[in-house]
Image (cartoon, rainbow, N blue to C red):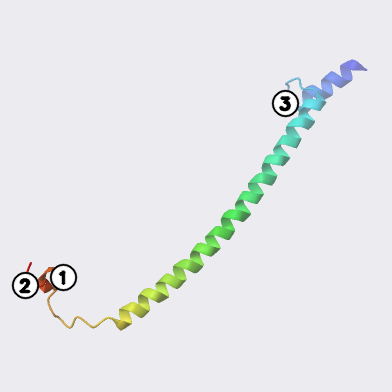
Amino acid sequence: MEDAYLEEARCDTGGRMEHPDHTAERLTALEIKASFAEDLVDELNRIVIEQQAQIDALTRAVARLQAQAPAADGAPFRSLRDDLPPHY
C-alpha cells in the first residue's frame, strides 16, 4: 500500500518526492498570488483609464489655447527680453 502511495506522489510531481500537504500549501500560495496579481491588474487598469481621461482633457485644453493664440502669420519670434522696461 505504501509503495503505491510513493509511486503516485512521484508521478504527480515529475519524479520528485513531495508530500501531498506541501503540494496543497504550494497550490494555496499560488492561488493567493494569482488573486493579488488579478487585483493589481484591475487597479492598474483603473489608473490607466483615469490617466487617459486626463490626457483627453489636456488635449482639449491645448487645442482651445492654440485656437485662442494669435496666429504667427510669419511674424518673427519675439523674446520676452525684447519687452523689458527701459531701466533694465
Query: Residue, x 6% and y 69% (percent of image)?
Result: 87
Which mark sits nearer the N-terminus, 3 or 2? 3
Q: Where's residue 61, x and y in %?
A: 39, 75
How busy is the neighbourhood of tag 1: few (under 14 within 10 Å), some, or many (20 plus)?
A: few
Find numbered disc 2 in the image and state the secondary structure of the residue it sits on: loop
**Between tags 3 and 2, which lies in front?**
2
Gap between marks 3 and 1, in whole Å?
Answer: 75 Å
The residue tagged 2 is 86
**Between tags 1 and 2, which lies in front?**
2
Find numbered disc 1 in the image and state the secondary structure of the residue it sits on: helix
> As displayed, is residue 73 above or below residue 61?
below
Q: Where's residue 73, x and y in %?
A: 17, 83
Q: Quadrant of the N terminus?
A: top right
Query: Residue, x 66% and y 45% (percent of image)?
Result: 36
Quadrant of the rendered image containing residue 88? bottom left
Residue 70 in the figure: left or right of residue 32: left
Q: Nearer the viewer, residue 25 or 79?
A: 79
Gap between marks 1 and 2, in whole Å?
Answer: 13 Å
Q: Nearer the viewer, residue 16 or 88?
A: 88
Query: Residue, x 49% and y 62% (percent of image)?
Result: 51
Gap between marks 3 and 2, in whole Å?
Answer: 86 Å
Residue 31 in the figure: left or right of residue 6: left
Which mark sits nearer the N-terminus, 1 or 2? 1
The residue tagged 1 is 80
The residue tagged 3 is 14
Q: Amino acid at mark 3?
A: Gly
Q: Where's residue 6, x and y in %?
A: 83, 19
